[in-house]
Image: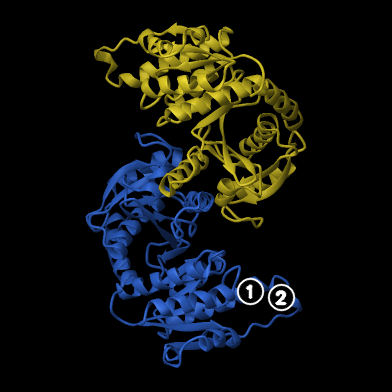
Chain colours: A yellow, B blue
Amino acid sequence: MEPGTARIAVDLLGGDDAPAVVVDGALRACRADPDLELLLVGPAEVADEIIGALSSRDRGRMAVRPVRHVVGMADAPARASRIDTTVRAAVAAVSEGAADALISAGASGATVTAAALGFGRWPGVRRPVLVASLPAVAGPVVLLDVGGSLEARPVTLAHHAMLGAAYAAVAHGIVAPRVGLLSIGTEPGKGDRTRRAADPVLAAANLPCGARYVGLVEGYDVALGGRADVVVTDGFTGNVLLKGIEGAYAMAGGPTGAAPRAAALLGVAGTAIVCHGAATGDDLASGIALAAHLHRSSATAAISALFSDLDEVTA
Amino acid sequence: MEPGTARIAVDLLGGDDAPAVVVDGALRACRADPDLELLLVGPAEVADEIIGALSSRDRGRMAVRPVRHVVGMADAPARASRIDTTVRAAVAAVSEGAADALISAGASGATVTAAALGFGRWPGVRRPVLVASLPAVAGPVVLLDVGGSLEARPVTLAHHAMLGAAYAAVAHGIVAPRVGLLSIGTEPGKGDRTRRAADPVLAAANLPCGARYVGLVEGYDVALGGRADVVVTDGFTGNVLLKGIEGAYAMAGGPTGAAPRAAALLGVAGTAIVCHGAATGDDLASGIALAAHLHRSSATAAISALFSDLDEVTA
């Protein structure tokens, strides 16, 4: 545990099984980290459920931002609009300085949009990206994008390489990260038109933190590691791959938590964690811990600074 | 075991660990299936190793097509050209009627090309596809394409839907297969431009064998099953996903053989199985068994007939 208080805004209504799993996740996170403070964003009765389960001493670590949700005739797909409201309120809380970071297991598109509008994007970033870290044999493998941006232009993939290298160094302390481009073989020239065009662009890219481009990698390398610390792909392929790996772990009865269900949002001027809609209480607790870790290591500011320096050189 | 002799041409030089794994795989396959006959395609000394390990009675099930491989100065990347030679000879053996199907663990691109040239493609097929069957909770999930064709046009994906439905029915006996389109969410409209364009095309496609289109599915659905029997995607995404699932099973220490390392080639006028370059003897034996099963069920002819009927309607 790194030192320092971390104040995390929690979207109480985000997630397929909200609010129950969010209540569970918030309680687990509090037990695990005594320097954690939570800002509970959503209906007061849900916040009360969390607060009521805590000791009187721990209650002082909770704050509440009540968000009313009006469910009326016009709200046929009511769930989405409610989630949207709480995630916007959580972003606003971080913008105002009432929290250091936020987490939501609501629709990831809604969270990405709310964060982009509320925090603003970094210069040079068209669409924020989602970064997942998978536990592999010799340490984490950083995979991006996993669904923030579906664009697959070579310049976008080069941005992902820069962001991923900075994230690996700042968030995981990986020295001189090795960056690979996800393809369907490792020999140069393997892949679709996008990968063949991106390979030389990544080879020429100016990567931060002593990172180096190691060329093409394959699907196994994301789950097993060994070949690259950072694997770059478009958000469509990354999302499909991450969920496929998750399904395989579920089938194999493998280690729980082996497939991450929380991803960090990069490219916006604030710290946000997007959880899987099907997140469990454990997943939410891991996501809250990730939010606290990124805040304590000043990761968002550090990665943003590294990226803007590089992007000026590249542009 | 279905009745009937099956004569499988085996590329002795295909695979990262050839010929050792091919020798091992051929011996395992022979032990498992008394009605199997093998045509060993490659150096005579490798074929002799297999034959020498068999009982005198089983030796009668082996035939040899010696392929000389000249390794000279001009053969710097000698491996590829040697593999290419043996896989072409295996295709020729099937074309001539000396074998019913072939298997190679050599470079899949070389096998696809050799089969397309040697057998000819079905009318309406621009590029053959590779089909993998993954064992899921309630039965196999058929995934295509896994690397034969990297094209992702909506009409190509509709062809994959037809081929996959026919394969599920003919090769696995699945009644009225459910066909899904791989995307990053299940709600209509989820996905990149290609998937959004393909979704209505698949919904309108004329699918064989009582198959029905069930809409968008996700990465988990390929590993876990339940939502679709056939999952349609482009060869880039499918290859990445299949290898990611394989890596996850390896990490989790899951059931061996859970991720298939043999894929059937569809769209050519002959039966061919493409094995993973890193295939083990077990994988080769499974691939040989798949080749025998497809021959015994007359799968290639049946799927081709189903596809050509439909394609006339669609075109």
Tell me, yes or no, whether the two marked residues, 1 and 2, touch with CB atoms within 8 Å: yes
The quadrant the N terminus of chain A occupies is: top right
Give the label on residue B75, or none: 2
Crowd around label 1: few <14 · some 14–19 · many ≥20 (10 Å): some
In terms of depth relative to the viewer, which is nearer, A235 or B201? A235
Residue B304: % across, % down: 32, 67
Task: Please determine whether, in this image, residue A203 is positioned above or below residue A94.
Answer: below
Residue B224: % across, % down: 38, 47
Q: Quadrant of residue A231?
A: top right
Name the residue tied to disc 1: B81
Residue B269 visible within the image: no
Q: Dot 1 falls on which chain?
A: B
In terms of depth relative to the viewer, which is nearer, A7 or A266? A7
- Tell me what residue is drawn at x 41 percent, y 48 percent: A251
Give the label on residue A302, or none: none
Count of labels in the image: 2
In terms of depth relative to the viewer, which is nearer, A37 or B40? A37
Task: Please determine whether, in this image, residue B172 is positioned above or below residue A175.
Answer: below
